[in-house]
Image: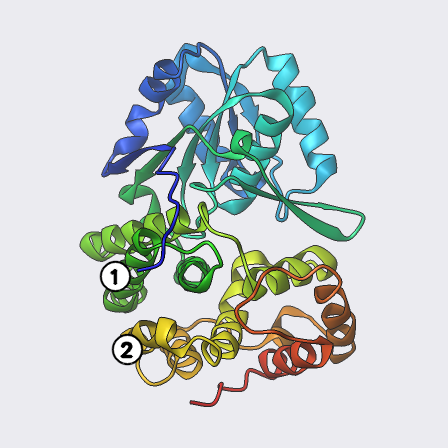
């Protein structure tokens, strides 16, 4: 076995049913008496109810979180945070809200209590992606990682089927890249494969019956595993392309990940077949084809064209993707990326 370094899991995790009730305890445990609650406009009512639950601990609600964490929204949130007298944020929602909480924490030193309501998985990471002037940049810093993450299965029961599937595919992408990352280690690989097995056995059941509590718990558990893995590895080609498409063309985050995954995973599996063999076994067939078939069975989107991307956009995306490439197990050039994006734009099933 090759040597490895594993920093250990830094964030405190509270997992279960009805655990949102412990939000106030977790704020107090961190030594705070005032917390600003964050959400998107869509979840503003949920954020207001959470603030009511927090009682005197709530310093207010900021419900303007937006996809890809635009820096102008962060600036308004920082003003609200300073005006509220808060010393902590409670982020309720998916990647947009969690990203805003991270952006506030990085700039102010605020502690974070995060309550994810999707499976997308940024909550356990030290990664912050932000957009400004049509470009998305990503940074890592220990100050970005949330102090406490509360997983409440009940909060996922009403997650629509489409969002359930795309955010789950997003999570699977984290696990896939953890396996072939340059700083991979056996602990994270075990977690990633365990997560994929859980997704494979339970996501179809959640799609069939969104109120299946046991299946929802299994999928949320899998999402935690993948989020944790992402938090300790170097991202590769898949995440680079997702950031390019989201930051430059405004494509929705989870849908972009879901569509790209079979193509990026299949592309890299050709270079590391022994590492990716367990993934192929979990989803059936080869890596790319198996993930494509699983996505199709679960009703995930399959074509970048359906996200509003034009064929002409693919040339620009490929050019941007090779300007500052991430570490990747398989070398690639602009032509390789252009071909991969074309297949994802058309929704072509990767060849086994």
Residue annotated with mark 2: 281
Residue annotated with mark 1: 198
| Position of residue 138 in the picture relative to residue 197 (left or right) | right
- Residue in the foreground of this view, choosing between 103 and 331: 331
Provide residue 348's location: percent of width, then percent of height: 54, 86
| Position of residue 350 in the picture relative to residue 139 (left or right) | left
Residue at 81% x, 48% y is 133
Residue at 52% x, 46% y is 95
Residue at 58% x, 61% y is 327
Quadrant housing residue 175? bottom left
Which numbered marker is on residue 270? Answer: none
Number of numbered labels in the structure image = 2
Q: Is residue 256 visible?
A: no
Q: Is residue 284 visible?
A: yes
> Which of the two labelled residues, at mark 2 and mark 1, occupies the earlier sequence position?
1
Which callout, 2 or 1, points to the residue nearer the camera?
2
Quadrant where the N terminus is found in the figure? bottom left
Q: Give the vertical position of 213 relative to 12 (above or below).
A: below
Provide residue 242's location: percent of width, then percent of height: 60, 62
Cα–Cα gap, marks 2 and 1: 13 Å
Question: Could you classify mark 2 by the number of other residues whose Cα lies within 10 Å: few (under 14), some (14-19), or many (20 or more)?
Answer: few
Quadrant housing residue 143? top right
Question: Could you classify mark 1 by the number of other residues whose Cα lies within 10 Å: few (under 14), some (14-19), or many (20 or more)?
Answer: many
Provide residue 344's location: percent of width, then percent of height: 58, 78
Q: Give the vertical position of 191 relative to 94 (above or below).
A: below
| Position of residue 191 in the picture relative to residue 51 (left or right) | left
Quadrant where the C terminus is found in the figure? bottom left
**CB atoms at circles 2 and 1 under 8 Å apart?**
no
């Amino acid at each position: 076995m090759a040597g490895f370094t594993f920093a250990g899991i830094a964030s405190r995790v509270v997992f279960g049913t009805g655990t949102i009730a412990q939000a106030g305890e977790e704020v107090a445990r961190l030594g705070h008496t005032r917390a600003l609650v964050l959400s998107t406009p869509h979840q503003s009512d949920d954020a207001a109810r959470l603030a009511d639950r927090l009682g005197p601990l709530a310093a207010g609600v900021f419900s303007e979180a937006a996809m890809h964490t635009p820096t102008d929204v962060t600036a308004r949130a920082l003003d609200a945070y300073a005006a509220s007298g808060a010393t902590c944020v409670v982020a309720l929602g998916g990647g947009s809200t969690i990203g805003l909480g991270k952006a506030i924490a990085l700039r102010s030193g605020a502690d974070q209590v995060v309550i994810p309501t999707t499976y997308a998985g940024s909550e356990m990471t030290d990664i912050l992606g932000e957009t400004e002037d049509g470009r998305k940049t990503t940074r890592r810093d220990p100050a970005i990682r949330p102090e406490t993450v509360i997983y409440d299965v009940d909060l996922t029961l009403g997650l629509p089927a489409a969002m359930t599937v795309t955010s789950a595919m997003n999570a699977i992408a984290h696990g896939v890249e953890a396996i072939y990352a340059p700083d991979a280690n056996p602990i994270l690989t075990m977690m990633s494969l365990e997560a994929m097995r859980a997704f494979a056995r339970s996501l179809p059941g959640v799609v069939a019956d969104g109120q299946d509590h046991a299946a929802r718990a299994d999928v949320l558990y899998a999402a935690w595993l993948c989020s944790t893995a992402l938090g300790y590895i170097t991202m590769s080609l898949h995440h680079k392309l997702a950031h390019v498409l989201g930051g430059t063309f405004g494509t929705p985050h989870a849908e972009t990940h879901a569509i790209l995954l079979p193509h990026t995973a299949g592309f890299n599996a050709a270079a590391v077949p022994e590492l990716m063999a367990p993934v192929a076994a979990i989803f059936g067939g080869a890596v790319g084809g198996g993930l494509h078939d699983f996505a199709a069975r679960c009703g995930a989107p399959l074509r970048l064209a359906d996200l509003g991307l034009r064929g002409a956009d693919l040339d620009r995306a490929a050019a941007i993707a090779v300007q500052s490439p991430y570490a990747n197990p398989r070398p690639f050039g602009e032509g390789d990326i252009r071909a991969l994006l074309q297949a994802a734009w058309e929704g072509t099933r990767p060849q086994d």
